[in-house]
Image: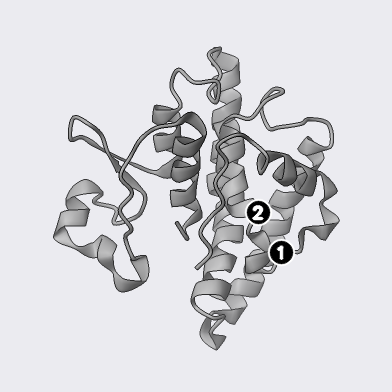
Amino acid sequence: MLSGNCYKVKLLMQLVGISHEWIHVDILANETHTADFKRMNPNARIPVVVLDDGRFLWESNAILNYLAEGTPLLPADPYGRAKVLQWQFFEQYSHEPYIATARYINKYLGLPPERAAEYHGKQAGGHKALAVMEQHLAGHPFFVGDRVTIADISLYAYTHVAPEGGFDLSAYPHIRRWCQEFEHLPGYIAMARE
């Protein structure tokens, strides 16, 4: 569960009590590039869920939306669902490419000299995303409505480990408050760190 995208899925399953078998896939050992894995996800990325009927579903936020159907973590009204999607798109396009990539370069690759410029180049975009989140959380307890949704799960996964990518969260008190509240949810499970 070192991947934030995998962690999102694991966290949702824990929060809503979905029984499952978790199979670890080592991306650093290219295990996503085998023929068997590409049969499940031709894009060769984790996570992938194998449904009870044998169908496959990939892309973490699509998986969250599927698994959260009928739970309090996914609003029933169209506007609430659209707001969840809004924050999930924000997470994938304005947050994850900066914060998760900087974390990967620093934590898993050891900040090699040939990727140092890329790592440093991710900092401004990551802080911009954090500032958008901070501004929103200054006036709201969570990202959609007054309770946790899968929008929060999507954003929490990489935000709470942002310091591993060089992002100091001390300047973001509302994000820190939100993380602390999130970590006290019934069923919460921490991300595996090693």
Q: Residues within 10 Å of mark 2 (few under 14, many from 20)?
A: some
Asked whether, in this view, residue 32 is left or right of residue 79, the answer is left
Q: In front of the other: label 2 or label 1? A: 2
Q: Position of residue 84 (x, y in %)?
A: 57, 29
Q: Amino acid at mark 1?
A: Phe
Which of the two residues, 37 or 178, is positioned nearer the viewer here?
A: 178
Looking at the image, residue 184 sits to the left or right of residue 40; the answer is: right
Judge by depth and name the residue closer to the eye, 34 or 93.
Answer: 34
Picture layout, residue 33 above or below residue 42: below
Residue 182 quadrant? top right
Q: Secondary structure at mark 1?
A: loop
| Mark before the other along the chain sequence, 2 or 1 | 2
* Percent coordinates x, y for residue 158 in the rendering: 59, 53
Q: Secondary structure at mark 2?
A: loop
Q: Quadrant of residue 69?
A: top left
**In the image: residue 7, left or right of residue 125:** left
In the foreground, 158 or 102:
158
Judge whether 117 appears above or below 148 on screen: below
Is the residue marked by circle 1 packed among few (<14), some (14-19), or many (20+) residues within 10 Å?
Answer: many
Instruction: Answer above or below: position of 82 versus 107.
Output: above
Task: Tell whether label 1 touches label 2 (CB within 8 Å).
Answer: no
Q: Amino acid at mark 2?
A: His
Mark 2–mark 1 Cα distance, whole angstroms, equals 10 Å
Q: Which residue is mark 1?
A: 167
Residue ID at (64%, 70%): 121
Residue at point 56%, 51% (across, down): 190
Write down the quadrant of residue 117 in the picture.
bottom right
Q: Residue 172 location, x and y as percent?
A: 81, 52
Q: Which mark is residue 6?
A: none
Residue of label 2: 160
Q: Quadrant of the N terminus?
A: bottom left
